[in-house]
Amino acid sequence: MMRYTTIYLILFAILISCTEKAEPEVSADRIFYNGPIYTMDDGAPEVEAVAIKADTFLYVGTKAGAETYRGASTKMVDLAGKTMVPGLTEGHAHIMGVGYNLLNVDLREAKSYQEVVEMVVDRAASTPEGTWIIGRGWHQDKWTEKPEMTNGFPTHDLLSDAVPNHPVYLKHASGHAALTNAKAMEMGGIDANSDQPNGGEIFKSVSGEPTGIFNETAQGLITKVIPDATKESDEQALRLALDQCFKYGITGFHQAGSGPDHIDLYKDFAQRDELKLRLYVMLNGRDESLLEEYFKKGIEEDLFDNQLTVRSVKLYADGALGSRGAWLLEEYTDAPGVHGHNVMPMEDIEDVTQKSYKAGFQVCVHAIGDRANREVLDIYERTFKLYPESAPKEPRFRIEHAQHFHPDDIPRFAEMGVVPSMQAIHMASDRPWAIDRLGQQRIEWGAYMWQTLLQSGAKIVNGTDAPVEPITPLASFYASVSRRTLQGNPDGGYEPTEKMTREQALRSYTLDAAFAAFREDRKGSIEVGKWADLTIFDQDIMTIPEDDILETKVSMTIIGGEIVYEAE
């Protein structure tokens, strides 16, 4: 009997050992499953499961296939119907501005000049007299109540009367104009006799007195007397900005212009593994010594465990449409004789463009008006032809904003491989009043031409231009597919033939954004071997009703396999 019992025990042990799952040769750290997973990989656009090992995708495919990488320590993450997409990239924004907008007075929600003044009065109550009060975000064309204005802008009088003892500097939402009070103008030495600067304008009344509005380069007359930010406030601003990025599902960020101090700050954060965000930095193209330094040492790519890249140069051809600073071929419809501003001499832009090209750096020029876009495209074309021996394989030069074109210039983007970096949210915010600036014909033929550009073969990079707009990708995604304001107007959208499809809109935030930063081989899609950067939503943005897109929330943000944000 004992002999049979022993045999039974041996057979039972063999049976158990056969049914136990062997540890895979390579086991995943995490496996995600049970939700829509959109990969942006044309070969497998939607899959059942994703396995991550360290900072890369180990497996992408079926749930059964992912299970073969399940080891004893693998964490199984049930998406429970939530939607996974490649990690979103903010294609054009200002990361320090995002942070400082939270530290300073945020005026974006103000519905009137009176509200703007009240916000400044509130800040003044807790600010020592004589200390600067800085704000940003007001936009007179979005106010529901309009004050008496000069040249389409408010004057400083109401602000100066309410806050007489603090110098106040309030940047327009576009960043291309500012409103100041009398105290700030006194400290800047501005009066009726002040000369107009090149590339800008001090707005003056009919009597010749400054109104408090400083347009384009004229802002420098005030900013030069504002104390520099401290290292402590810079660090605080950057931390706040990073938190915002992660909260809204942003895993990559194209930083539209930085000087040496901020680049050093990014490096400090990255070296301590506090950056985490994949930051793609454009050098401030006005800083000659910075450019000279980088042209000598070359691009810096994927520093500190792939957190930081410096390989582009940011320049400015014109201003903004809202402040009538965008440089137009024909005069503004609502301002006869006004064509906008060329804010940086085109010969300087051409010189820096050629030096950048020969040094292997990408060039990114801010151009909004049709004249500015044409001038920049001409410079790019001349540069490519003049220096063929210096040509990078694909320079991927960019035009930032690219809002308004002459129709003849639209095909030139694809023909030359120039990337239009276009923030769809600008259309949603600006289109209701942009028609006043450009008129119906120019709007229909050349403004916010997304689908026309895509059909021509161009790749569009999307974004928000934060802090000009809130750094919320879903707002730009919604604008891309609806061509409506965030309030849902008008029915059917503005110029609806220019809408993006949802796949195109998602691509503009993922794979095409990666292409514009020379990193489509490592990010922008969910494919084996690429960095495990992911954004997870609580709804399926690719199928839900259009009106539900803005109600969607980010559930989780993952960078290099690390969860950097998880909703409560």
Image (cartoon, rainbow, N blue to C red):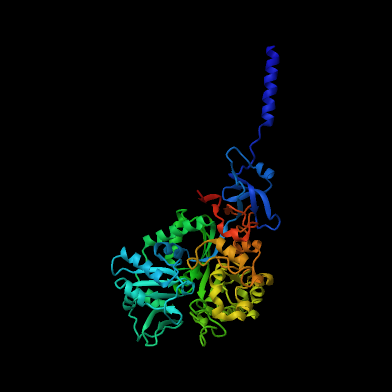
Numbered label tally: 0
Q: Which residue reaches farthest front?
A: 145
Tell whether 78 sits left or right of 174: right
Q: Nearer the viewer, residue 108 or 360?
A: 108
Q: Quadrant of residue 162?
A: bottom left
Residue for point 61% across, 39% down: 71
Res 394 seen here: yes
> Is residue 511 something that shows in the picture?
no
Q: Residue furthest top?
A: 1
Q: Residue at x 62, y 61 (%)?
A: 546
Image location of residue 23, percent across then percent down: 63, 37
Horizontal placement of 181 versus 312: left or right? left
Q: Quadrant of residue 530?
A: bottom right
Nearer the observer, 225 or 433: 433
- The location of residue 260, given as percent across then percent down, is 43, 67
Quarter in which the N terminus is drawn? top right
- Please provide percent x and percent y for residue 76: 60, 42
Residue 560, position as x, y percentages in the image: 55, 52
